[in-house]
Image: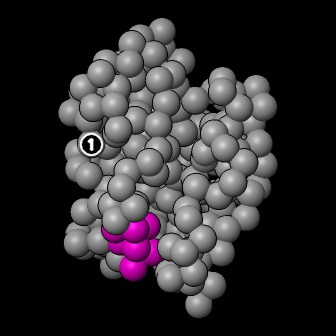
């Protein structure tokens, strides 16, 4: 991991504290856990809030083709860094809440998975817009959202999961990450 990644994230946090889920890049243990259940045979991947690209790097190291990745980052400096670092991936500088109003990012093909580094600490209506847009417009019917959190409980409120017909399962923890983090797999049940 480049030494200036922490500086990039801290600078992004100073520009907009609510848009960032962490002040330091996620560690390799969390990156492995977040990406270990993603199978390229099932389709392309959208990464939300990639920050400095720790999860992107983990996917690419597993042999994921860069052209099968879309990175959605709201911060202009981080988006520019990602575009330079991962030239084969498509980097979109946009708010993830707008994905529900966008055409599918891979044309006729929908994403098989979402890898999310978003903090999901936004107002509940914005979180609902993000999650609903992902499942309605961007993911395959059997697509999965992989979300990490620093608390043990599911980051999506139960009422939102029930309204959208979503099931959630904690798939593991990355104790060596600072701070420790847990990964959740979220999918549509109907």
Residue 125 position, x and y percent, is 34, 65
* Residue 101 located left or right of residue 131: left
Residue 51 to residue 47: above or below: above
Q: Residue at x 60, y 47 (%)?
A: 148
Residue 10 position, x and y percent, is 38, 18
Q: Residue at x 45, y 75 (%)?
A: 135
Residue 170 position, x and y percent, is 74, 57
* Residue 12 located left or right of residue 109: left
Q: Which residues are magenta?
A: 128-136
Quarter of the picture containing the C terminus is bottom right
Instruction: Kindly identify which residue carries mark 1.
Output: 74
Say which of 178 and 72 sits in front. Answer: 178
Residue 184 position, x and y percent, is 67, 56
Q: Residue at x 66, y 23 (%)?
A: 178
Say which of 187 and 41 sits in front. Answer: 187
> Does the segment drawn in magenta span residue 23?
no
Say which of 173 and 137 sits in front. Answer: 173
Residue 31 to residue 168: above or below: above
For label 1, the SS is: loop
Residue 72 to residue 2: above or below: below
Q: Can residue 68 be seen at all in this image of the molecule?
A: no
Quarter of the picture containing the N terminus is top right
Residue most extreme to the top: 3
Q: Quadrant of residue 4?
A: top left
Determine the main secondary structure of the stretch shown in magenta.
helix
> Does the segment drawn in magenta span residue 130?
yes
Q: Residue at x 40, y 35 (%)?
A: 20
Q: Quadrant of residue 29?
A: top right
Q: Residues within 10 Å of mark 1 (few under 14, many from 20)?
A: many
């Amino acid at each position: 991991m480049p030494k200036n990644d922490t500086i990039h994230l801290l600078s992004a946090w100073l520009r907009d504290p609510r848009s960032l889920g962490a002040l330091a890049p996620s560690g390799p243990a969390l990156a492995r856990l977040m990406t270990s259940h993603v199978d390229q045979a099932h389709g392309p991947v959208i990464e939300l809030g990639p920050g400095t690209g720790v999860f992107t790097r983990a996917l690419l190291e597993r042999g994921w083709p860069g052209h099968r990745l879309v990175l959605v980052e709201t911060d202009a400096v981080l988006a520019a860094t990602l575009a330079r670092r991962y030239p084969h991936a498509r980097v979109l500088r946009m708010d993830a809440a707008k994905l529900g109003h966008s055409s599918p990012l891979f044309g006729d093909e929908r994403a098989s998975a979402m890898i999310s580094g978003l903090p999901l600490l936004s107002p509940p209506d914005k979180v609902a817009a993000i999650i609903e847009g992902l499942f309605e417009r961007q993911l395959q019917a059997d697509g999965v959202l992989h979300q990490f959190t620093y608390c043990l409980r599911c980051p999506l409120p139960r009422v939102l999961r029930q309204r959208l017909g979503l099931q959630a399962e904690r798939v593991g923890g990355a104790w060596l990450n600072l701070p420790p983090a847990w990964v959740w797999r979220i999918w549509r049940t109907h």
